[in-house]
Image (spheres, rainbow, N blue to C red):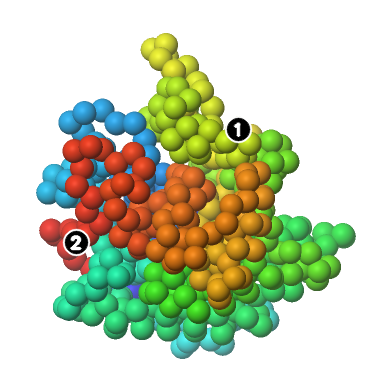
Amino acid sequence: MTPVKYIITGLLGIAICTASCKKWLTVQPKTQMPSDVLFTTESGFQDALTGVYIQMKSGNAYGQQMIFGTIERLTSSWDVTTNTTEQRLGLFNYSDEGVQGALSSIYAQEYKIISSINAILAEVDTRKEVFLSAGSYEMMKGECLALRAYCHLDLLRLFGPIPGNIQGGTVLPYVKKISREPNQHLTYDQYKTELLNDLSGAAALLKDTDPFTRYSQADLSNPGSVNSPFKPENTYSAFRFLRMNYYAVKALQARAYLWFRDNGSAYACAKEVINAQNPDGGAKFRLGTLSDVSGGNFNLSMEHIFGLYDFQLATKFEQQFTSGVLKKGSGTTTVNNQLYGNTGTDIRETNLWALITLGNGSKCYIMKKYTAAMESAAIAPFQIPMLRVSEMYLIAAETAPAGEGQQYWAAFRTARNITVSTLPADLAQVQLELVKEYRKEFFAEGQAFFAYKRINAPKASFLWAPSAATINYLVPLPLNEFVQ
């Protein structure tokens, strides 16, 4: 069996949803189907891509460790027990066996996802004739290119160098094909070029074919209904906000350009997402407000440019949060004062945390962002935020031309119900101010470590850094590194 067929067999084993999974995300299982059979139909490609999304929400990727698990331990987001892997992650003890294992698991899973994407891309051009629905070929290829870039960017942000301190030599493999041979490590500039090329290719493919550019999130959520103008040939093109859509590509470009220190391009992409409109002229993505979170929308789903749907999120919330595994402090000092500055008005401070009593009688604060009821028929509570419009506002505040960043900063702070302050004139000071907001805004979303690393934040700016820690943003590659 060829490497591609091995990957596809694995994908089909993954792409099986339980009865509780929403109908539009359900894939009927096909066992041991080789690629030359699977890719003879449009639906076969769709099954394979659904398998990729399911891989992405695995525990070692965006279903836990890259959202509220290991990646948040690197910023001491959660209380820890002494002499544990979790504590040593916060101490940046990369020589510890447990720490190495946790980081290696992420590395391996990201490249597994990439391999699955490459298995699809290896066939999509030669099988172009099987795509019968309008725009389906472009959407399939565009999504895959962008997802490949998404995973590669996170690998670079975690295991790569600090953007302002690029040394010579190679960094990581940018994997574009299935092979039994180890993939070559590229230089930073080579890696950057491959990543940006994937994103520009994805944007070109999706710009005129993605229904999200022509319909609202509400329209895409009700395909074919009497009141919806969205009448797709099949429901696979619905719910584009739960997939790597055109605007998600632009948002990812903004994130990538910011990392690569191309502020002009980052601003242009962020601005395009912020200014995106629905057919009625309303904003396609709006900042959440007090009424949203007070109404129970704790993950601010209206901000999601790309949200990964995880029907197991309710179970994960019980296992990780209400159990007290992921908790922060037992009094108001830690969360209210140290994180939010005790404003008394910040919607995140007043609505996203709960003081609970554990089985042993102790009290602790837990994050409510991933609260979801298993019996709920709603989609929003089961969305893991992968890209949010609030990030675009923060990127725009940092990268806009002189004098323009303040308007985005003001809009963001107003939505969060906090006093509008004036951004400093000096860029370095702006970055230090904004990194505080990244810490608050993307708590339990896996973005804080990257925000600190991007600007090489000193320990004094690193909230909750253990006194014994020496901040080290240079995460080493796994000792047993192998990329398929």
- Please state the horizontal and vertical placement of residue 255, each as a whole percent of the image: 47, 68
Residue name at image x 69 percent, y 36 percent: 294
Q: Is residue 122 above or below residue 480?
A: below
Disc 2 marks which residue?
A: 477
Marking on residue 428: none
- In-front residue for pair 289/313: 289
Q: Is residue 483 above or below residue 13?
A: below
Query: In the rendered view of the protein, which quadrant contains the N terminus?
Result: bottom left
Nearest to N terminus: mark 2 or mark 1: 1
Residue 82 in the figure: left or right of residue 206: left
Q: Is residue 109 left or right of residue 128?
A: left
Q: Is residue 101 left or right of residue 3?
A: left
Quadrant occupied by the C terminus: bottom left
Horizontal side, residue 57 vs residue 210: left or right: left
- Amino acid type at mark 2: Leu
Q: Position of residue 363 (x, y in %)?
A: 44, 18
Q: Quadrant of residue 8?
A: bottom left
Three-letter code, disc 1: Gly
Q: Relative to 326, does residue 462 appear above or below in the rendering?
A: below
Res 243 quadrant in image: bottom right
Q: Is residue 288 visible?
A: no
Classify 10 Å Cα crowding around label 1: few (below 14), some (14-19), many (20 and above). some
Q: Residue drawn at (26%, 38%), measured in percent from left and top?
A: 466
For the view shown, which residue lies furthest in the top direction? 361
Q: Which residue is mark 1?
A: 344
Report helix, strand or loop for mark 1.
loop
Q: Position of residue 401 (x, y in %)?
A: 56, 75
Front label number (2 vs 1): 1
- Label 2 and label 1: CA atoms lie apart by 43 Å
Percent across and percent down for residue 297 are 65, 41
* Residue closer to the observer: 430 or 31: 430
Identify the secondary structure beneath mark 2: loop
